[in-house]
Amino acid sequence: MTFGFPPSSAASMSPAAGPSAASTNPLARVLEPEEWAAAGIPLLRNPREVVTGLHARHRPRLSTAVVAVLDPDERLRASASFTRRPAPADGWMFRNALLAQLRRIIPHDLRRRTPVRTAVLLHCREGDGRWTEEDGAWMWGLRDACTLHGLRCGAYITLTRDGWQVLGEGRGGRHPNARSAPSALDLTGAPPALTRTGGVTSEVLRRAAAR
């Protein structure tokens, strides 16, 4: 399968196991903006529609992550949201949390020669839309979670008080934002989407933060 990334050293690691010796440095589990932009991440045809839909479904607050799986027509097939506890940003920990959510909401596509579904991540956080090391850790985690679940790695989107921003693309808008009320959700003519919520705090993140 080709995702536009070099092979991941974590692809052969069990999510329940501890990090390998090659990935014990948290700084190695961060993707820089240049790496992300050059990785061939598929562009969303209508990012505003995706962001608005996820915002309406999950009503994310600060420190909330929303992972969603889109079909080739960019229709939502499944999504989940969870809130992480305050802890140092670590791509391995984020990878495990995202993978746990993906396994809950949708079967893997590892038997396919080429992935047909795409996972995107919306992260509601403090600050503005500029890249941070925490964003880089989420990017690393999303990339590896997609690899381990047989999905294409899609967009990483920040949601702040200033609005939303698709990092690496330069596309964004003021609404919705971290303080705006969710719009009415219109499901007319849309297939039913499997949407579940990961609870107040992801169990994976609780275990990883306790280490």
Image: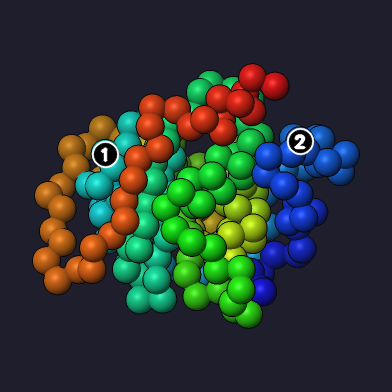
Q: Amino acid at mark 2?
A: Gly
Q: Where in the figure is residue 191, as x and y percent of width and height?
A: 23, 68
Taking 130 as reference, is 210 left or right?
right
Residue that label 1 marks = 59
Chosen colour scheme: rainbow
Place of residue 31 in the rendered image (x, y in percent of width and height, measured from the top left):
67, 49
From the image, which quarter does the C terminus lie in? top right
Task: Name which residue lies at 44% across and 58% down.
Answer: 106
Is residue 182 something one can see in this rendering?
A: yes
Tell me where residue 77 sits by quadrant: bottom left
- The residue that appears at 26% across and 53% down in the rendered structure is 52
Quarter where residue 108 is shown = bottom right
> Circle 2 — which element?
loop
Please name the residue that numbered disc 2 is placed on: 18
Residue 64 x/y as whole percent: 41, 34
Decide if residue 100 is on the left or right side of residue 123: right
Quarter of the rendering containing residue 1? bottom right
Mark 1 → mark 2, Cα distance in angstroms: 32 Å
Q: Nearer the viewer, mark 1 or mark 2?
A: 2
Q: Secondary structure at mark 1?
A: loop
Instruction: Give the vertical position of 88 relative to 129 (above or below).
Output: above
| Image position of 173 with respect to 38: above or below | above
Disc 1 marks a residue whose amino acid type is Arg
Residue 40: image location, x then y, percent: 60, 70
Q: Which residue is painted at 26% across and 54% down in the image?
A: 53
Looking at the image, the residue that sits furthest to the right is: 21
Circle count = 2
